Image (cartoon, helix red, strand yellow):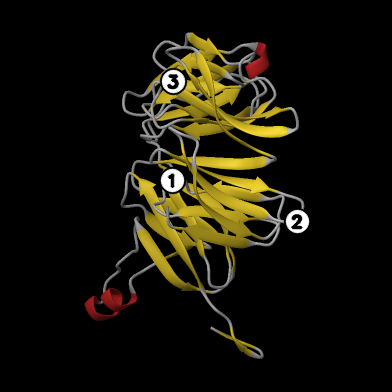
Amino acid sequence: NIKRGGFQKTGMLVLDTVPPGAKIYLNGKPQQLFFKKYFSGGESFVSTPAKIKNIAPGEYIVKMEKDGYSPWEKKLSVFSGMSAYAEDVSLFKKSLPLITAAGKIKNVSSSPDKKYLAAVQNEKINIIDTDKNALLTINTEKSASGTNEILWSPDNKKIMAERIIYSTGDGSIEFNLGKTASDSSDIKWGENNDEIFYIKKSKGESLINSFNLTTKEEKSILKEKEITVFIIKAGRLYYISRGLARSDFKAAEISSGKIISSIELPYSSEYEFINPAQELINLIDKKHQTLYLINP
């Protein structure tokens, strides 16, 4: 891709859907395999999962559609020498029940196995079972009705909204983390279905704590001067610790809290972990528009 004054690196789109086999469109144009189309004389569409290489930097309207399913469409930005991801896309059957209750939908989230869709609306959460085409309405606590975030347990059987945990089977409240995790941030499910992790402030320091829903016990895993974000993978905590003039990416064992590795990074207030299902840890610095790929 030639640019005045030299060459400009192209980027790549990495796309996947559940179910797979969705046709891919960029700015309304279907993507086709050039050589198959040229030699066979027919159409050969690119479908998910797919990696589309040599994309000129810029913004693209990406659409993925499959017969019998509602299409997915979003504007994605491709940067020079980088990859843009849309791998966690769920396509839902057109025969799903309609949510007809009045009010604005504040947030929509799919379950880890892509079988359920949750939508926050007014003072309730509507959960759609995409296999059975069934709708479950959970009447939430008032404190949870304004949430913009829905957290699913790994087994899809629990859902958390504003620190209140509900059963996705019957909508009952299983536990209220309100007092236990008060003044906490970056709340996440652990790798099992009974443990919650979060950042908590105490006496000028940041702690990463865990809470066991079975034993109702809170435990402090580690503490630093300031922890901003973290992610959990294979029994380890990966997190960003921030100082006066630097930031550090650190890895620690959950069982002992022992730090096993550390990487110095440029100071930034806008680090974020993305694409958690990826084998490599994806850490983006939004302030400096830099993506780090870290091998665990």
Asked if residue 167 is positioned above or below residue 7 in the image, the reply reads above
Q: Specify which label sits upstream in the sequence, 2 or 3.
A: 3
The label nearer to you, 2 versus 1, is: 2
| Label pair 2/3, CB-CB below 8 angstroms | no
Task: Determine which quarter of the picture holds residue 59.
Answer: bottom right
The label nearer to you, 2 versus 3, is: 2
Determine the residue positioned at 32% across, 49% down.
20
Asked if residue 203 is positioned above or below residue 81 in the image, the reply reads above
Q: Amino acid under label 3?
A: Lys
Asked if residue 111 is positioned above or below residue 259 in the image, the reply reads above
Task: Determine which quarter of the picture holds residue 76.
Answer: bottom right
Q: Amino acid under label 2?
A: Ala
Determine the residue positioned at 70% across, 34% down.
205
Q: Specify which label sits upstream in the sequence, 2 or 1.
A: 1
The label nearer to you, 3 versus 1, is: 3
Q: Nearer the viewer, residue 219 or 197?
A: 219
Secondary structure beneath dot 2 equals loop
Note whether residue 149 is visible: no
| Label pair 3/1, CB-CB below 8 angstroms | no
The residue wearing badge 3 is 158
Determine the residue positioned at 61% across, 47% down.
240
The residue wearing badge 2 is 245
The residue wearing badge 1 is 88
Task: Determine which quarter of the picture holds residue 179.
Answer: top right
Q: Label 3: few (<14), some or many (≥20) within 10 Å? A: many
Q: Label 1: few (<14), some or many (≥20) within 10 Å? A: some
Where residue 163 appears, x then y in whole percent? 59, 20
Q: Specify which label sits upstream in the sequence, 3 or 1.
A: 1
